[in-house]
Image: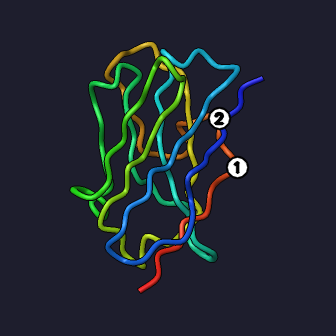
Amino acid sequence: QAQLVESGGGLVQAGGSLRLSCATSGVTFSIYVMGWFRQTPGKDREFVAAISRSGGSTTYADSVKGRFTVSRDSTKNTVFLQMNNLKPEDTAVYYCAGTPSWRTSTIYNRGSDYNTWGQGTQVTVSS
């Protein structure tokens, strides 16, 4: 069955960096649009970044533009989120999501567009 497993979360000081990974299995990774979302207690899930199935198109939330980079490695069936210059407001549980697409450049920034989700990884940024 389809499975997404995030890793790489942790505690970091403001200004630091973390690299999240999302390993996929049971899916045809090459046709999957992949996204990252985050959520804090009492708040709605928030879009962070997404990458097309080809890797040629990416999009980011304004709050992370210039600091976060999403990428994918088809040899490892894994998507990454490099997070630099982290801020306390980046503290959240980060979720990886995926869904198949027949178009190589399609990107989704709504959670409802994704049909497979990981269990999440906690990122805590101290001030």
Q: Residue at x 21, y 56 (%)?
A: 66
Q: Position of residue 45 (x, y in %)?
A: 55, 60
Q: Secondary structure at mark 2?
A: strand
Q: Residue at x 44, y 51 (%)?
A: 19
Considering every residue shown, the one lying at the far left of the view is: 66
What kind of residue is marked 1?
Answer: Gln
Q: Nearer the viewer, residue 101 or 25?
A: 25
* Camera-side mark, 2 or 1: 1
Considering every residue shown, the one lying at the far bottom of the view is: 127
Q: Position of residue 124 (x, y in %)?
A: 53, 73
Q: Residue at x 38, y 49 (%)?
A: 82
Q: Residue at x 37, y 56 (%)?
A: 83
Q: Are marks 2 and 1 in contact (CB under 8 Å)?
A: no
What kind of residue is marked 2?
Answer: Thr
Q: Nearer the viewer, residue 69 or 43?
A: 69
Occupied quadrant, residue 54: top left
Q: Position of residue 109 (x, y in %)?
A: 41, 44
Q: Which of the labelled discs sits on residue 116, or is there none?
A: 2
Q: Which of the labelled discs sits on residue 111, or is there none?
A: none
Left or right of 4, for residue 54: left
* Disc 1 packing (10 Å; few <14; some 14–19; many ≥20): some
The residue singled out by tag 1 in the image is: 119
Q: Check the image and report above or below for 29 versus 7.
A: above
Left or right of 17, for residue 125: right
Q: Secondary structure at mark 1?
A: loop
